[in-house]
Amino acid sequence: MPLQPRRVRSMLFVPASRPDMIAKAAASAADAVCLDLEDSVAVSEKAAARRNVVVALQQLDFQTRPRIVRINGIDTEFAYRDLVDVCEAVGDRVDLVMIPKVSAARDVQFVDTLLSQIAGARQRVVETGIEAQIETAAGFLNIREIASSSPRIDALIFGPGDYAASMHMPLAAIGERDQHDALYPGHRWHAVMHTIVAAARAHGLRCLDGPYAGFRDAEGFERACRVARALGFDGKQCIHPSQLESANAIFSPSPAEIASARALVDAYETATTQGRGAATHDGRMIDAANLRMARTILEGSG
């Protein structure tokens, strides 16, 4: 189960090699900020990027935003140093560690063990959570085991770019629709996205959709957000501050949805108080499923 409830509609990625961008991200409209040590950082800059993360977490005010550090894949030579160098120095300020390309439960368990050893050595009681990125064929096949692999697991995240590469699926740009989507009779990513949401819900986790590369394509980004929300995702990763406003709005219940849900719950509660065996709202019978959906909307509006 997650360590604590976290509402994340938008997660802003920022390269850890860019201290100027980290400072801007900390003051942005993002619900969460992820300091990336992986794909956005060149090999020659990995060590310096770790130092940047330490300084940023020591000096910047992220307010109530979860502070996330994405490490390099655990099959690389960089991952253990990412964890040791950052978490030994500022582990009490790292809310979540994001693991890329998680392929099996053992990947999460390795990070869990190392985080526990670091916390023990530093005599810290703050628990750092884990976010697992599902972006390989093996990860897709093992989602259920990954979702239950550790008490630290907080979220499952879809990584469309690396997933496409792993599956040998042609993709023009990460997260965007292209000619292959137009040809496919359905939603090409439905299976993996739906499975991520199902595993997250079954284990009480959050789930986020991956990034949309075309940050100047506002219409395309909004469409991708709406598709992800329709599938049940809580939010979306963002690569540019210009995407935050749309993500925050789309992954929040609209005023009309909130009003309708509140009216349905009120109608049910009134019928119950009056001892009526059946309740109706807007010309329809209210059953248990309607009530659960309405209460989910109201819970998500807080």
Image (cartoon, helix red, strand yellow):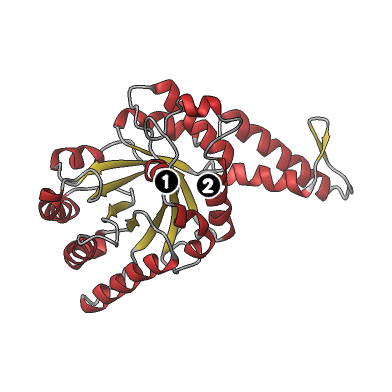
The structure residue drawn at horizontal position 74% and vertical position 43%, both measured from the top left corner, is 290
Q: Is residue 129 visible?
A: yes
Residue at 56 percent across and 50 percent down: it is 195
Question: Residue sitting at 13 percent across and 53 percent down?
Answer: 55
Q: Left or right? Give the position of 238 relative to 298.
A: left
Q: Residues within 10 Å of mark 1 (few under 14, many from 20)?
A: many
**For this rendering, which residue is in front, 218 or 142?**
142
Q: Nearer the viewer, residue 115 or 23?
A: 115
Q: Number of labelled discs?
A: 2
Where is residue 158 shown, x and y percent of the image? 44, 46
Left or right, 104 with respect to 110, comes to right
The amino acid beneath tag 1 is Tyr
Q: Is residue 242 above or below residue 236?
A: above
Where in the figure is residue 108, as x and y percent of width and height? 38, 65
Q: Residue at x 37, y 45 (%)?
A: 162
Query: Please, is residue 243 above or below residue 117 in the view?
Result: above
Q: Is residue 84 above or below residue 240?
A: below
The kind of residue on which mark 2 rests is Val
Labels 2 and 1 touching (C-beta < 8 A): yes
Residue 241, which numbered label? none
As drawn, the residue found furthest toward the front would be 168
**Which mark is on residue 192?**
2
- Compute the Cα span from label 2 to label 1: 9 Å
Neighbourhood count class around disc 2 (C-alpha, 10 Å): few under 14, some 14–19, many 20 upward: many
Q: Which residue is mark 1?
A: 163
